[in-house]
Image (cartoon, rainbow, N blue to C red):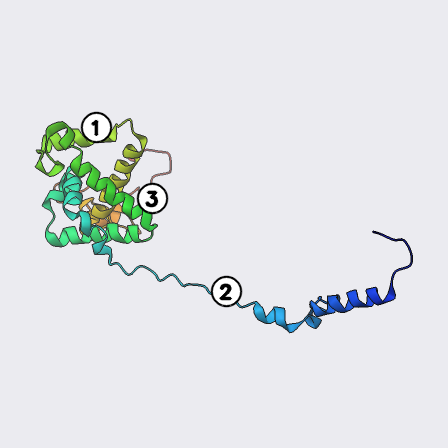
Amino acid sequence: MFTSGPPNKAACEGLSESRKGRGAEPRGNPSARPPGRLASRRPALYVAVMPETTAPEQVLAPVRRPFRALAETILPRCRDLSEEGWSDVEAIVGRALLDRPPGMRRQLRLLVRALWWLPLLRWGRTFGGLGRERRGRFLSGVERSRVLLLRRGFWGLRTLVLMGWYGRPEGGAATGWDARLGGWREKGPRQDEPAPAVPPAPDPSVPRGEAAP
């Protein structure tokens, strides 16, 4: 039963003592809080993520044979590459892929494997077992595929192949372009073409606007 009347002084004192026993936090200065709670708050542990130490040449190692077969069809000039030249191409592509998330590298390797095995559904052979004409027909179909993800993946693979080829010093020199301040004027005429005709210097004795006699 509840009774009305003045509060019991002894009960109020007991309640106050019980609150102190539970460690009520004093208001005001935060430094006056009980040390027990502060000591229980330990700093969180952070795990450092070590950078990947894979060599650029090893990024395409699991799909080296399919990648080279696809690259020779995308860019026929790759057929003339030596083993050292292929290593340079794969290193350039590998360095570009190391700057991307690991998931993207896995997607690229999955795409290369898919392009290697998909011809089985039509010709009963892998991409490596096809002739050059069928290889070109197959990749042309992939380039115009209705599947957007497959079409985008092929264009990304094509970009990597071109980057690997023209990123080599020999590939850049094969284009005939040289980064010089004077441009083509410093290179001079090619051996198979005559030098450009140089116009004669103007005669200072002839007034400007009049033809020389």
Callout 3: SS: loop
Q: Are marks 3 and 2 in contact (CB under 8 Å)?
A: no
Task: Count neighbours of disc 3 (C-alpha within 10 A) and say few if under 14, some if 14 to 19, many if 20 or more.
Answer: few
Q: Secondary structure at mark 1?
A: helix
Task: Tell me what residue is drawn at x 88 percent, y 60 percent.
Answer: 7
The residue to which callout 1 is attached is 141
* SS at mark 2 in the image: loop
Residue at image position (29%, 48%) is: 105
Residue in view at x 32 percent, y 31 percent: 148
Label 1: few (<14), some or many (≥20) within 10 Å?
A: few
Query: What is the three-letter code of the residue carrying label 1?
Result: Gly
Near-viewer residue (201 or 175):
175
The kind of residue tagged 3 is Pro
The disc, 2 or 1, on the residue closer to the chain's N-terminal end is: 2
The residue pinned by badge 2 equals 44
Give percent across and percent down for residue 79. Answer: 11, 43
Name the residue rendered at 22%, 47% in the picture: 164
